Each structure stands twice: as C-alpha cells, then as structure tokens.
C-alpha cells in the first residue's frame, strides 16, 4: 500500500518523469502526464513512442523503475492512448 494520497504523488511523479524524459526524446518521442489514481501513474506516449513496439518495455524498465526508486516501490505506470478523455473515464 502506498502511504501517499494521489494528490501528494503528483509533483514527485512529474519531477521523476521530467528527469527521464530524455530517454523518450532521444528517439523522437515524449509523454503527456495525465494524472495519478490509486497509486497508478497514467501517461500518454507521444511522437515516435506512441507507435513503438518497445514502448511498453521503456515504460516498465525505465520510467516505472525510476518512479519506484525515487518515490515508492509499489508505483506502476500505464499508457493511455486515449489521453485525458480516457483518464477521466477511469
């Protein structure tokens, strides 16, 4: 169980993602931070990343790994291709 509210996680998560953004940008991609719900970080991959076959590996082995190191080991990250609209329906 994550001992932080979703609201408390937003800024630390944004900071960690910003530090890791270069990983996506070097291959012509990026991400849009959508929010945090129940300890799950939601993003929308953009640019070359949204159609890349390795995007799930990048999410789990780079971004999620760093979130777990920096903030809490139970955090996870999910790509929502539908963006804000899909996030709001969760």
Image (cartoon, helix red, strand yellow):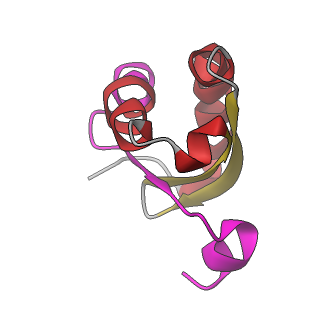
As for residue 72 lying within the magenta part, the answer is yes
Q: Viewer-proximal residue, 1 or 20?
A: 20
Q: Residue at x 55, y 49 (%)?
A: 51
**Is 71 situated left or right of 19 in this image?**
left
Q: Split into 4 quadrants, where in the image is the C terminus? A: bottom right
Query: At 65% across and 71% down in the image, what residue appears?
Result: 82
Residue 81 image-quadrant placement: bottom right
Is residue 13 visible in this depiction of the protein? yes
Q: Is residue 32 magenta?
A: no
Q: Number of numbered discs present?
A: 0
Q: Is residue 90 left or right of residue 77?
A: right
Q: Position of residue 26 (x, y in %)?
A: 65, 14
Q: Which residues are magenta?
A: 65-90
Q: Position of residue 12 (x, y in %)?
A: 61, 31
Q: Position of residue 6 (x, y in %)?
A: 55, 56
The spot of residue 30 in percent (x, y) is 69, 34
4, 61: nearer the viewer: 61
The answer to whether 18 is drawn above or below residue 60 in the figure is above
23 with respect to 84 (left or right): left
Residue 9 visible within the image: no
The residue shown at (41%, 31%) is 58
Up-down: is 74 above or below 61? below
Name the outermost residue toward the bottom.
Answer: 89
Residue at image location 27% in from the left, 33% down from the top: 73
């Amino acid at each position: 169980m994550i001992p932080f509210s979703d609201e408390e996680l937003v800024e630390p998560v944004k900071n960690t993602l910003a530090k890791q953004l270069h990983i996506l940008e070097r291959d012509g991609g990026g991400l849009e931070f959508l929010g945090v719900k129940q300890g799950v970080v939601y993003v929308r991959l953009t640019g070359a990343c949204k159609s890349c076959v390795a995007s799930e590996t990048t999410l789990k082995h780079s971004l999620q790994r760093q979130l777990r190191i920096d903030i809490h080991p139970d955090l996870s990250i999910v790509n929502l291709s539908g963006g804000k609209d899909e996030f709001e329906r969760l």
